[in-house]
Amino acid sequence: MRALDPEVVEAVWETIEPLIPRPADTHPLGCHRRKAPDRLCFWGILIRLVTGASWVTVEAILERQVSDTTLRARRDHWITAGIFERLRDHALHAYDRIIGLDLSEVALDGSLQKAPCGGQGTGKSPVDRAKLGWKWSVAADARGIPLGWAIGPANRNDCTLLAPTLADVARTGLLPDIETLHLDRGYDYPKTRTQLASLGLTDITIQRRRPPSPGQPKAPLRFGLRWVVESTNSWLTNYGQLRRSTDRKNIHRHAHLCLVTTLIITARLIDWRNRWSPESRPIR
């Protein structure tokens, strides 16, 4: 997986390191216990994100160099400092500046995942025998780059996550640049169209859910460009901690989505650099 590629890891770490707040030394004798390196903690967080392993297992993989408690505490500290949010924004704007986001065709859809430990933002999955699960609703540009998302329980209707998803896209300032929005038949409601029109999104492609008239042949399915967001959902599902989340808070799941988006974009930027490098080998 590209997320564990040393070149990708180092590029992401070089962006994270300047964002980490340095704690003030308030100990009267200056004899603090040595702090675990941030770089090691980042590597542990990344291993758990990719594999879906428990914190205790990650501690063992790192040969007890850092405890599972320290890893959790460091992750929470970085979330409180807004590091993952800022990391995602940096990556998205860097991609838009270097390659360019294609907002002419934007697709939006949800994806159901497992959450066996329950917790905040989970519910009974309608497609997995009522087991606990969670879902994300993500908007992606024409090349599959995640623009924004919303998180909810597995039993939450996709329509209810449409507004929060577009609000997250609007937070990045990209909403006014969307030309055409592609949705599946689950969004084919008058309320949805009214909601999108109020946001200035009038060019919408929604697969109709109305049944054919009696005696008329069934119309063929028209997928439009919704397959792009399906590719995005597939990329996100490759990460074990997203596919089977053992976290109990939405802030942790949101941080993981931010980090995964950064990893995807970083790999794309590295490929773009290597493609146009004068030292790259010719195709033939």
Image (cartoon, grey):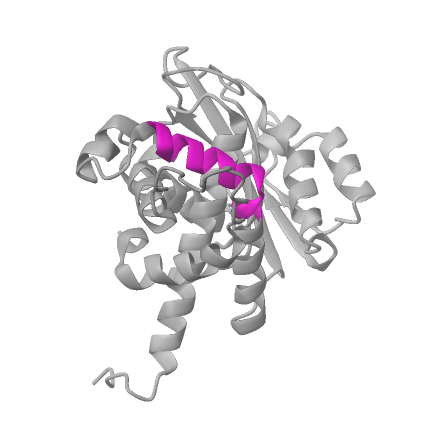
Q: Position of residue 103 (x, y in %)?
A: 62, 60
On the question of residue 103 being in view, the answer is yes
Q: Is residue 263 left or right of residue 1?
A: right
Residue at x 28% of width, y 37% of height: 66
The residue under the point 62% across, 30% down is 161
What's the magenta bit mostly, secondary-structure-wise? helix
- Is 70 part of what is drawn in magenta? yes
**Where residue 96 sits in the image (x, y, percent)?**
57, 66
Is residue 54 shown to the viewer in this render?
no
* Residue 169 position within the rendered picture, expressed as x and y whole percent measured from the top left: 65, 47
For the C terminus, the image quarter is bottom left
Q: Hey, which quadrant is residue 239 in on the image?
A: top left
- Front in this rendered view, residue 235 or 24: 24
Q: Camera-side residue: 133 or 73?
A: 73
Please state if 198 lies on the left or on the right of 123 as rendered. right
Q: Position of residue 166 (x, y in %)?
A: 67, 42
How many numbered marks, from 0 up? 0
- The stretch of residues the image draws in magenta is 69-85
